[in-house]
Image: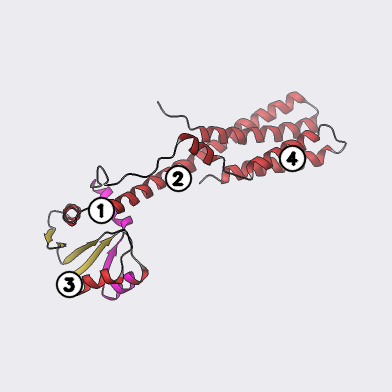
Amino acid sequence: MKRLNLPLVLDTVFVGICAFLLFFTAVRFYTKSVAAALVFGFTALLLFGALAYVYISGKQNKKLLLSRDEKNKKLLALHLSLSSDGYIRRLFKSLLGEDAKISGRKVVLNDTASFFCFKMEPLTEDDVAQVIKYRYEGKKRIYCAKSSREAAALAANFLIEIVGIDSVYSSLKEKGLLPEKYVYEGAEKTGFFKKVKSRFNRRLAAPLFWSGIGLMALSYFTFFPVYYIVSGSLLLILSAVSLVTAQR
């Protein structure tokens, strides 16, 4: 059974309520008809609620895919940093294909020698210098988690290609070679209530909503209701917009 996406439902309902209050108050004021106001209000609630649902769910799905890949990239980088040199060479031999051969601390394919420097810190100039000093007539490539600017510049001067974790992850994923289980998967899992709470960390939405409700309520009792209706409507619109656009 698919788990209820409570933040999405609550955000959608919030936008729908804002739309209902806005249209109900405006139509009732100009037509003096409660029935017409209810019809327009509920229509706006359904329409804008549906639009908000489609928009927010799309952004959530995109964020989920991106965050999942980013998390796996970090896990892969840590996994390779903690893995043995032999494991890394065997893994990249499989990645590069049957013609690739392990030779010492490198993997050779055609005229390109691949070196590996996966560690917790970015690739340094000293790491690149070690590869430069290694005697090899063909091309050289360094696989790493990430590289410093200085190391990248030095490598470029000696025509050494640097391949970071983004490309490594994509290549391993494409060929189905990603580890089934990472060495360390101790990333803290976000609890249900923490997820829900994070969805309501939109500071502008609540005060704008209640201010808009207050102004619209005053329109029922004041001699100048148009000002309160317009102002309250604007605040409700801003409240809904601040909530929807805050989706990441």
Q: Does the magenta-highlighted stretch encompass residue 233?
A: no
Residue type pointed to by label 2: Lys
Report the residue marked by disc 2. 63
Q: CA distance from mark 2 to mark 1?
A: 28 Å
Check whether the beta carbons of the residues at disc 4 and disc 2 lie within 8 A of each other: no
Report the residue marked by disc 3. 134
Magenta part of the chain? 151-177
2 or 1: mark nearer the eye: 1
Q: CA distance from mark 3 to mark 2?
A: 43 Å
Find residue 151 and report its image quarter.
bottom left
Q: Which mark is residue 232?
A: 4
Q: Which mark is residue 47?
A: none
Q: Position of residue 199 (x, y in %)?
A: 53, 40
Magenta-highlighted stretch: main secondary structure? helix
Report the residue marked by disc 1. 82
Helix, strand or loop for disc 2 = helix
The mark that comes first in sequence, 2 or 1, is: 2
Q: Spot the residue most to the bottom.
A: 157
Helix, strand or loop for disc 1 = helix
Find residue 123 and report its image quarter.
bottom left
Q: Does the magenta-highlighted stretch encompass residue 165?
A: yes
